[in-house]
Each structure stands twice: as structure tokens, then as C-alpha cells.
Image (tube, grey):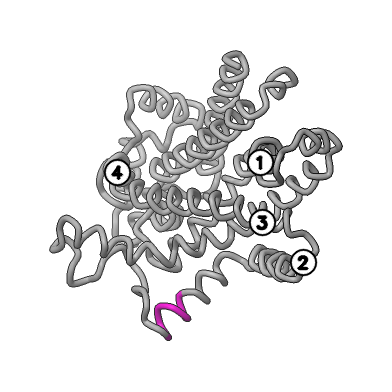
Amino acid sequence: MWSFARRRVVDALFVIGTVGTLVFALLHLAPGDPVTAALTDPRVPAAVRAQLRTQYAFDRPIAEQYLRYVRALSRGDLGYSFSRQRPVRSVLGEALPHSLLLVGTALGVAVFVGIGVGAWQAVRAEHTAELVAGAVTAGVSAIPDVWLATLLQSAFAIELGFFPLAGACAPRSCGALTGWAASVDLLHHLALPALTLVLLFGAAIARLQRVALREVLEDPSLVVARAKGGTPLEVLRRHALPRALRPTLTAVGMSLPVLVGGVVFVEAVFAWPGMGGVMVEAIAARDYPLVTAIALLGSALVAVGTLVAELGAAWLDPRRTMHC
């Protein structure tokens, strides 16, 4: 098990390093640079532009720039954000907690609800209610995240007024509320963007869990468990469900990049002050350090999530580590 974990940690570090290198190369090979994007006024003298490029080493070969970046990164220096006019670490320190809150809430609820709904569908296969639930989950999975976010926003925020339209706090209460009142206000604003991700990811998990559990329930080995006097609920809880969770957890880990990608669009629709909006603005401003840092952070979160999912699947089935 420990050998399996070490291999997966090395794989995760390799993925993070590869993503960071590719993003750095693509950004620097594209035409333009942060100086050009920041100084749009044609009256700025060319000498000033050249001086800034020299100051930040943008006029140096890309290999030298990359080595400079790696050395700074090894010291914990993520660089300076040209679009935000402050250190990248400060920018991420404000946006990351909001994204982690959104993703963590959505992922936790989606996994719990998706596994529960999928297990219920597998047990109630071919019943009318199960067929309706299967059609609903398939339909929700097929809706693009931007469309679903816009539909929920139009229905529950604009038409019904149940939830705030956008943001993480009411304009008049931002910074004014404290304690329990501030927490309630934050959760009120979190509800719709989290619900969007829960529906999308939960529907996909439910479909995966249904298929996995149906295959396990048809396994002849469960006949022995039933013959020994096990009740249907006991057989499901002790034998079938743990085995069916393995492929579902693995699929959840592999789907995390999709969830992280969807967060960007959902945050944009609801103006949620997380990494998504920062990423869009940084790309438009050609903010090399900020874009690279967000890419590294995103790949690290995906790698860690995938690692946790794989370790969880290996814990449920120790034989899995023997073949990895």
C-alpha cells in the first residue's frame, strides 16, 4: 500500500511539473507580453517599454526566463501580478478560499447524493420511478454548465428571488456583517453556484454508481452471501456497495479536471470571487505569473484529489495495489 502511495505521489508531482512547464511555454511563445497588455496607451515611449521588459527579463531567451521562474518558485516566490499590481500570492490568498469553499461544498454533496441516488436506482432497476430518475440524471448531465447556471440564476434569483443574483455577499453588507450573520449571508450566496455543480457532477456520479452496482449485484458470489442468511440490506451494505464504490471513486478522481474547468464558467455566471474570474482576467491581460500560478495550483488540486480517490479505491480493494 505504501509503495502504491509513493508511486502515485511521484506521478502527481510529475503531472504538476508538466502542466506548469507547458503553460509557461505556451504563454511565452504567444505574441505579446504583460508590458504590451498593460501599457496600451500609444503615448508611452518605446524606451519605457523596453526598460520594463529588461527589468522583468521578458527580453531574455525563454529558457533563461524559465530557469529564473523555477528558481523563484523553489523559494516560494510566485511572482508579481501585472494586472492586479500586487504579489501573486496576495491575489491567490483572496480568491482561493472562495473557490475551495465552492468546490469542496459541491463535491462533498455531489458524491454523497450521487452515490445514494445511483445505489437506489440499481436496487430499483426497471421500476417506473427509477426509469424517470435515470432520464433526469441523463438530461442534467447533457446540459452545458453555463446553460444550467444561467437557467438556475434566471429561475431562482431573477424570477422567484429566492437567492442573490451574484457575488459572495450583499453590496450593503460586505464587510459589515460578522459572526453567524456573515456565515448565513455567505451560504445564501453560495447556494446557487454550488447547486449548479452538484446537479452536474451528482448526476454523472449517480449514473456511474448505478452501472457499477448493477454489475456487482449480478455477481454469482453474492448468491453465497444471500444463502448464508444475509438480508438484502446487509448484502448491499457489506458486500455489494463497497465493491461498487471502487470504480465510482476512481471515476470521480479522473473527472476532477472537468469539475475544476466547470467552476471557471459557473463562477463567471454568478460573479463568484474565486479563481475562475481571476483566471479569465489574467489571461486577457497576459499576466504570465498569475496565469502560471493558477494553472499550477489547479493542477495540484486535481492531482491531490485524484490521489485521494485512488488511495480510497485501493483501501476498499487492497488487491488493486498489486496491479498498479
Relative to 262, say whether 97 is above or below: above
Indicate the position of residue 88 as horizontal and vertical percent values: 32, 41
Is 141 in front, or is 137? 137
Quarter where residue 321 is shown = top right
Residue 213 vs 314, above or below: the answer is below
Amino acid at circle 3:
Trp
163 vs 292: above or below: below
Q: Earlier in the sequence, mark 4 or mark 1?
A: 4
- The answer, for residue 51, to whether it is visible in the render is no
* Residue contact between numbered discs 4 and 1, judged by CB atoms under 8 Å: no
Instruction: Please rate how many residues cluster around mark 4, counting C-alpha atoms within 10 Å: few if below 14, some from 14 to 19, many from 20.
Output: few
**Quadrant where the image shows the N terminus:** top right
Query: Residue tagged by mark 4?
Result: 93
The magenta-colored residue range is 153-159
Q: CA distance from mark 3 to mark 1?
A: 15 Å
Judged from the image, the secondary structure of the residue bearing numbered disc 3 is helix
Instruction: Nearest to the eye among marks 4 and 1: give it.
Output: 1
Residue with the mark numbered 3: 120
Type of amino acid under label 2 = His
Q: In the image, which disc is placed on residue 234?
A: 1
On the picture, is 295 further left or further right than 226?
left
Q: How many angstroms separate mark 3 from mark 4 (CA)?
A: 41 Å
In which quadrant will I find the C terminus?
A: top right
The outermost residue toward the bottom is: 159
Q: Earlier in the sequence, mark 2 or mark 1?
A: 2
The total of numbered circles placed on residues is 4
Q: Disc 2 or 3, which lies upstream in sequence? A: 3
On the image, the x and y values in percent for residue 160 come to 41, 84
Q: Earlier in the sequence, mark 3 or mark 1?
A: 3
User: Where is residue 287 shown, x and y percent of the image?
Assistant: 40, 48
